């Protein structure tokens, strides 16, 4: 039996009176690539923040590996998880400095071979000396992903990491994340609007709809024979939202 990275039960998160994220039961095994899909505003980013251990649950139980989380999360636990936001912020200075700083926060001082490797993997080597203030939105996303990959976290959470990228760079990102998953059994939870991407990268896919996780299934089952008619309609592009 595989180790469970996350286990959620009866979880809800409320943002004011009008919105609540509700997850009855969800387990994410360690080493899985799990994709979240759903329309804008369905709760994907909220669920990612909950899994990042920064957003507390209003009700229910959240287990991270064997530890039940209640309120304050120890720093040692937080450092096992890294999230790449849809609109990431970078340090001022060069691209290389921004990536190296992530290592220094983890106690690894100075330039390392890992920085060069991740720059090369994401096609950023020529931008290493460029100021982060001059980067495009897509380049900023790539640097934020490089900053996350260089520290080799146990869990990587991705919120639309390829939204501003051309197809060639989308392929670079998918391969880099897939390689990290295969080589280190890094658990990946990936929110995307791109159903083709979800089908390419995920072992399982979950659909969030109006704050509720309405279906979770192995990828091919999700796309070919979903149980919920809303999932079938979403996959076929018939739902208007």
Image (tube, helix red, strand yellow):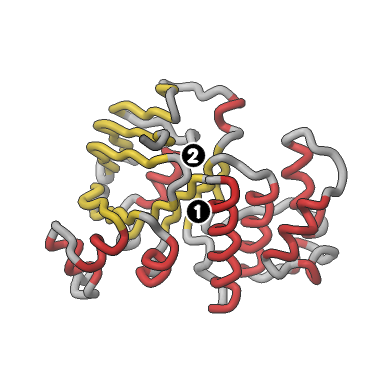
Kindly give the residue lying farthest to the front in the view shown: 1
Q: Position of residue 93 (x, y in %)?
A: 82, 56
Q: Residue at x 59, y 51 (%)?
A: 183
Q: Residue at x 20, y 62 (%)?
A: 231
Label 1 Cα crowd, 10 Å radius (few <14 / some 14-19 / many 20+): many
Label placed on residue 158 = 1
Q: Position of residue 217 (x, y in %)?
A: 26, 53
Instruction: Examine the rendered structure and indicate whether residue 185 appears above or below residue 240.
Output: above
In the image, taking residue 178 as reference, residue 201 lies left or right, namely: left
Q: Quadrant of the C terminus?
A: bottom left
Name the residue nearer the viewer: 202 or 167.
202
Kindly give the residue lying farthest to the bottom in the view shown: 167
Q: Residue at x 32, y 56 (%)?
A: 205
Task: Residue under label 2, please give it.
Answer: 52
Look at the numbered discs 2 and 1 and tell me whether their residues touch, using CB distance below 8 Å. no
Name the residue nearer the viewer: 133 or 117.
117
Instruction: Examine the rendered structure and indicate whether residue 37 appears above or below residue 236.
Output: above
Secondary structure under badge 2? loop
């Amino acid at each position: 039996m595989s180790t469970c990275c996350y286990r959620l039960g009866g979880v809800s998160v409320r943002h004011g009176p009008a919105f609540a994220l509700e997850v009855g039961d969800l387990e994410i095994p360690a080493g899985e690539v799990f994709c979240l899909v759903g329309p804008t505003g369905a709760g994907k980013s909220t669920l990612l923040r909950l899994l990042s251990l920064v957003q507390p649950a209003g009700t229910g139980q959240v287990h991270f590996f064997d530890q039940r989380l209640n309120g304050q999360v120890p720093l040692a636990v937080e450092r096992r998880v890294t999230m790449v936001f849809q609109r990431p912020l970078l340090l001022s200075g060069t691209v290389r400095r921004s990536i190296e700083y992530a290592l220094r926060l983890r106690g690894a001082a100075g330039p390392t071979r890992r920085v060069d490797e991740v720059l090369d993997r994401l096609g950023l080597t020529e931008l290493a000396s460029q100021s982060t203030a001059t980067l495009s939105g897509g380049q900023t996303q790539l640097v934020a992903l490089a900053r996350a990959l260089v520290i080799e976290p146990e869990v990587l959470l991705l919120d639309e990491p390829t939204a501003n990228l051309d197809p060639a760079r989308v392929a670079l990102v998918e391969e880099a994340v897939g390689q990290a998953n295969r080589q280190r059994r890094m658990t990946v939870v990936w929110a995307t609007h791109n159903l083709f991407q979800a089908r390419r990268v995920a072992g399982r896919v979950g659909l969030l709809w109006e704050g509720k996780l309405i279906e979770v299934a192995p990828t091919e089952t999700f796309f070919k024979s979903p149980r919920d008619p809303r999932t079938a309609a979403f996959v076929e592009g018939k739902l208007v939202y």
